[in-house]
Image: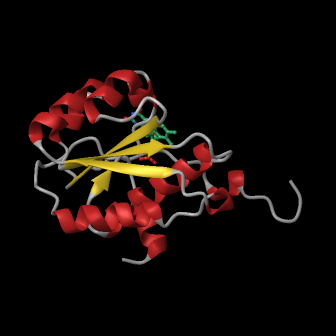
Amino acid sequence: METVDAIRDRRSIRQFTGKVVPRSDLQTIVDCGRLAASGSNRQPWEFVVVTTRPMLESLAIAGAWIAKAGAVVAVVMDTSSRWWVEDGAAAIENMLLASVALGYGACWVEGDALAREEELKRVLGVPASKRLMALVPIGVAAHVPVVDKKPLDEVLHWEKY
Ligand SMILES: Cc1cc2nc3c(=O)[nH]c(=O)nc-3n(C[C@H](O)[C@H](O)[C@H](O)COP(=O)(O)O)c2cc1C
């Protein structure tokens, strides 16, 4: 799939068929995450991939629907890097787009994960010194929502604001 098509097709997917996502595809998705741009090339990220049903159910404290994902990638950040938030965001977006390119749907779950960050860190065994930035549930989409987007001419300015 062309990159521009993946960007246009991407939607936040919160309903999955339950189909297994092969390990090789998960590896490709995380590989695309770790290849993202990062401030001073610090690459302050690590990724925990969860595939077993009991672990996915434990992560569902951030949203019941997460238990039905084929897998979840947890994004763990080293906050000693000045741009860790931007870097993590770049890695997450890369993984969302890679998921679409491979025929899956995914969702950037940050707000709901931050609300339960300490519990989720315990479940995942993330060291206290690191932040759990987001969960990215991935799977075959059972439903693709229609989302309202601002039209291009409302946000695009040529030459001057
Ligand atoms: C920083 C950030 C945090 C988000 N947190 C959550 C979340 O906690 N739970 C959730 O279901 N979706 C979350 N989302 C997904 C947004 O709700 C979604 O991107 C938005 O509604 C637009 O829909 P779209 O992704 O299909 O274009 C988050 C997205 C971003 C960028």
Rendered residue at 28%/41% (across/down): 14
- In terms of depth relative to the viewer, which is nearer, 150 or 84? 84
- In terms of depth relative to the viewer, which is nearer, 92 or 27? 27
Residue 70 lies, in percent from the top left, at 17, 50
Rendered residue at 21%/68% (across/down): 24
Residue 30 lies, in percent from the top left, at 36, 60
Residue 64 lies, in percent from the top left, at 22, 28
Furthest residue toward right: 160
Furthest residue toward bottom: 2
Rendered residue at 49%/43% (across/down): 77
Asked whether residue 57 appears in the rendered view, the answer is yes
Instruction: Please tell me whether residue 66 is drawn above or below residue 69 in the rendered image.
Output: above
Q: How is the image coloured?
A: secondary structure
**Count of numbered labels shown in the rendering:** 0
Instruction: Please tell me whether residue 72 is drawn above or below residue 153 in the rendered image.
Output: above
| Left or right: residue 39 compared with residue 15 | right
